[in-house]
Image (spheres, rainbow, N blue to C red):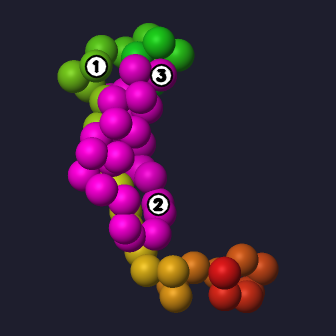
Amino acid sequence: MPLITVSMYPGRTEEQKSEFAKAVTKSAVEILKTKEEHVIVVFDENPKENWFLAGKKL
C-alpha cells in the first residue's frame, strides 16, 4: 500500500490538492502496479518559516 507524503507550504486550494492527489494516484497505479484504492496521499503543510536548505531559511 503506497503512502505518498507531499510536503509543501500552505496556501493551495482544496481543488489543487485534489487534482494533484488524483494525478499522483494515477501515476502510482501505472508505475507501481497497485490498485487505486490502495494509494494514500497525505499533504503535510508547513509554514515557510519552518523550511531550511543547507542551514539557511528559504
Question: What label does residue 7 carry, if any?
Answer: 2
- The residue positioned 51% from the left and 80% from the top of the image is 48
The stretch drawn in magenta includes residue 10: yes
- The residue positioned 33% from the left and 47% from the top of the image is 17
For the residues marked 2 and 3, what is the alpha-carbon distance in whole angstroms?
Answer: 18 Å
For the residues marked 3 and 1, what is the alpha-carbon distance in whole angstroms?
Answer: 10 Å
The stretch drawn in magenta includes residue 28: no
Q: Position of residue 26 (x, y in %)?
A: 40, 20
Q: Quadrant of the N terminus?
A: top left
Residue 31 seen in render: yes
27 in relation to 6, above or below: above
Under mark 1, the amino acid is Glu
Under mark 3, the amino acid is Ser
- Looking at the image, residue 47 sits to the left or right of residue 14; the answer is right
First-in-chain label (2 vs 3): 2
Q: Position of residue 41 (x, y in %)?
A: 33, 42
Q: Position of residue 10 (x, y in %)?
A: 38, 70
Q: Quadrant of the C terminus?
A: bottom right
Helix, strand or loop under label 3: helix
- The residue positioned 35% from the left and 46% from the top of the image is 16
9 in relation to 6, above or below: below
Contact (Cβ within 8 Å) of mark 3 with mark 1 = no
The residue at which mark 1 appears reads as 36
Residue 3 seen in render: no
Under mark 2, the amino acid is Ser
Helix, strand or loop under label 2: strand
41 in relation to 10, above or below: above
Question: What label does residue 27 carry, if any?
Answer: 3
Contact (Cβ within 8 Å) of mark 2 with mark 1 = no
Closer to the camera, 58 or 11?
11
First-in-chain label (2 vs 1): 2
Please state the extent of the stretch shown in magenta in the rendering: 1-27
